[in-house]
Image (cartoon, rainbow, N blue to C red):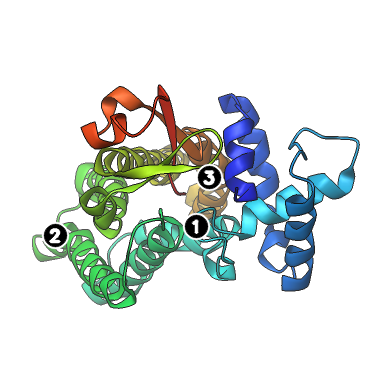
Amino acid sequence: MEPNVRFWITERQSFIQRFLQWTELLDPTNLVVSIEKIEKSRQLLLTHEDASGSDLEDKRVQEAWKRSLSTVHPDSSKLIPGPFRPAALLPFTAPMVFLSMLPVKSLKSMILPQVSFYTYSTVFNIVNGNASYDRRPHESILVGAGVIASSTFFGLFPRLLQVRFSLNSILSRSVIPVIILAQLSGMNVVASRSLEPLRGIEVMDKEGSVIGYSRKAGTKAVKDTATSRVVLFGTSAFIPEVFSYFFKRTQFFLQCPWSLWTLKLSCTILVMGLMVPVSFSVFPQIGRIQCSELEKEIQSATEETELFYNRGV
């Protein structure tokens, strides 16, 4: 069985345990760890199949799990490209979220932040989604290009209206952009991983044996991940806006108006720094689904009452 799958199946963790686990996996050093060290860690886990994630007696095992879980895709057992590993989400998207929420001076000033954010989000979702179904490279490229174009359009549309009709109310400047960003982040997951509900993803028993491919499991995996993205980016955009609203009414802001952007950027990074592990921890990495909820052909293929699937990140 793939070591990462074995870990998430055997380690029945609570939300707090998953959160603490993700705070380790999101260590920025996991972005630059060498391939040689990753291969040695994987070899250690493959030769010690009884190695547990809670085995504190052997620090080598702990470090091996950290490297494997943070750099290797559980479906394909292939290395995740450095810029799209889970630990890269914060440093790449936090500045984009900050720039996307700046006041609109012209539509041109908003195009680059929006295109950059949705391009990165789309590729991240595709790379870290479930990879157990048959998918050709050109399909991913076509789906990704369509998702980037549509997400960027819908992200820019309310800004276009704001510039066109000179809308300066707090609703149009702060509230609506936060709602749009949160909803589009969730829809971006649904669209970029749309093949999973259509073709079905692998469902397996507790031993890791594949029972079949389920569209219902694919739908659940995408839905749960989309929900976590709405929570992540909605909260990360909303809280800095609230802080900014009250900060503008202080005497310090009147004396140093430039400090608003420093505060807003710092607040965005701090909130996202907390919300990234929270959003990854809301749902288990390897999801569980009752066999009775799956297709009849899968129910007839096993006597297990509960099956497992990779939710993706």
User: Please, is residue 59 above or below residue 118 in the view?
Assistant: above
Q: Quick one: label 1, few (<14), some, or many (20+) residues within 10 Å? A: many
- As displayed, is residue 293 above or below residue 285? above
The residue carrying mark 1 is: 94
| Residue 146 screen position, x and y as percent | 20, 70
* Mark 3 or 2, closer to the camera: 3
Res 310 visible:
no
Q: Judge from the rendering whether residue 73 lies leftward or rightward of residue 239; answer left or right.
A: right
The tag earlier along the polypeptide, 3 or 2, is 2
The quarter holding residue 165 reads bottom left
Of residues 13 and 271, the one nearer the viewer is 13
Which badge, 1 or 3, comes first in the chain's sequence?
A: 1
Vertical arrangement, residue 243 with respect to residue 68, above or below:
above
Residue flagged by tag 2: what amino acid is it? Ser
Please, which residue is most extreme toward the right here? 57
Q: Which mark is residue 166?
A: 2
| Residue 275 coordinates in the image, percent (x, y) | 52, 40
Which of label 2 and label 1 is nearer to you? 1
For the residues marked 3 and 2, what is the alpha-carbon distance in whole angstroms? 34 Å
